[in-house]
Amino acid sequence: MKTSIYLTLVVFSGLALAGCGSSKEVAGPPEWLNKPMAGLDEGAYAATVGTGATVEKAKERAVRELGYYFQTNIKTRSTQSTMYKETSDGDKSTSERTDRVAEDIFITSANQLSYVTVEETYLKDGTWYARAILDKPAFGMYLTQIITREMESFKSQFDEAQDKPISLLKFSAGADRKTARIKQLDNYLSVLNQSTGISELTEVEKELNTFRQNVAFMVEIQFKDSTKAKKQNMATSALRDELKRSAPELRFGENGTPQFYLSCQVKTLAENWIRPDNFAQLSFDYYILDGEKKPLEKLSGTAKGAGTTEEEAFRQAGINIARQIVSKWK
């Protein structure tokens, strides 16, 4: 039976949780059963309770509940949160980003769980209960180290990219994912009442925005065999539209003096219009040229499109060409 769980901290089954080797004996139902923070300093700790059919399942659920703690507090602060949907089927487990904003924190080893302890458990009416306790200062230090490392890498990549127009173009196209991740990590810190401020990130974003505002692409697409104008126009329009959709941070086809030209030469390789296998296969050579039309990069490839009509097959092939082009940037 499949179950869906939304979480922000993902703990894989079978991991050894820090402090899980023993359980504290209690005479009766512990206070933390209904009040997870019982006996703890709220400024230094966060605590959650998990339940399960076994003590191991209860401990895992307790740690997962810490993810809900951050998710809820981040939303309360009206900041950005990334959630994962975990679908379990037997022993198989997969996670997918539901908002496609940034990667999350994956706890993948017991060493990284040094800021989480699960020492207290309790059995009641056949159900196990476990309390997970997060050491806020220790977790904050861990997050700060990650942010510092990723910010240094991001800034270094930006500095290197500025030496070449094509490098800066590629960096700009993929920068939003990287900045979203760093900001998300800073959101976790804000829940802990800590923050790096990430002022360097703000400065890089300002420079990137200036670059993007001044970047204009002129897209030139031409079929080498211009004998099927209607179908080829479908491919051309779809290619242009998909470029705009896939890379909205860059400007395509706007008036003014372009800083870059994207020249794409397309040729029909094969067609088949015997249903149900309707398809068109196209080859393409695309070039990125600078403002003076000097070549900066070339990519060659093939793309296939299928559809119920010939026009639809050509349209889908055009979309697939654009996706290959953008994948080289991002």
Image: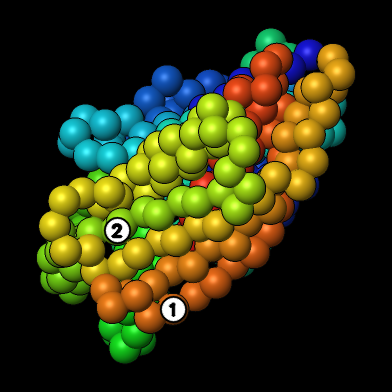
Left or right: 131 in relation to 163: right
Q: Secondary structure at mark 2?
A: strand
Question: Can you see residue 95?
Answer: no
Left or right, residue 196 beside residue 144: left
Counting residues from the N terminus, which is met first, the one under dot 2 or under dot 1?
2
* Above or below, comparing residue 203 to residue 50 in the picture: below
Q: Which residue is mark 1?
A: 295
Considering only vertical position in the picture, is 105 above or below 145? above
User: Residue 74: image x %, image y %?
Assistant: 27, 38
Q: Position of residue 43 (x, y in %)?
A: 23, 49
Q: Amino acid at mark 2?
A: Phe
How far apart, in angstroms, are the residues tagged by discs 2 and 1?
A: 14 Å
Q: Secondary structure at mark 1?
A: strand
- Residue at the (31%, 57%) spot, across then down: 218
Q: Indicate the quadrant where residue 122 lies.
A: top right
Q: Neighbour class for label 2 at 10 Å: few (<14), some, many (≥20)?
A: many
User: 118 or 274: which is nearer to us?
Assistant: 274
Point 63% across, 48% down: residue: 225
Q: Is residue 160 visible?
A: yes
Question: For the residue carrying disc 1, how many other residues have a C-alpha within 10 Å: few (<14), some (14-19), or many (20+)?
Answer: some
Circle 2 residue: 217
Q: Amino acid at mark 1?
A: Pro
| Nearer to the camera, 51 or 169 | 169
Horizontal arrangement in the rendering, residue 279 relative to residue 182 (left or right): right
* Front-lying residue, 153 or 13: 153
Residue at (59% x, 67% y) in the render = 299
The x and y percentages for residue 41 are 27, 47
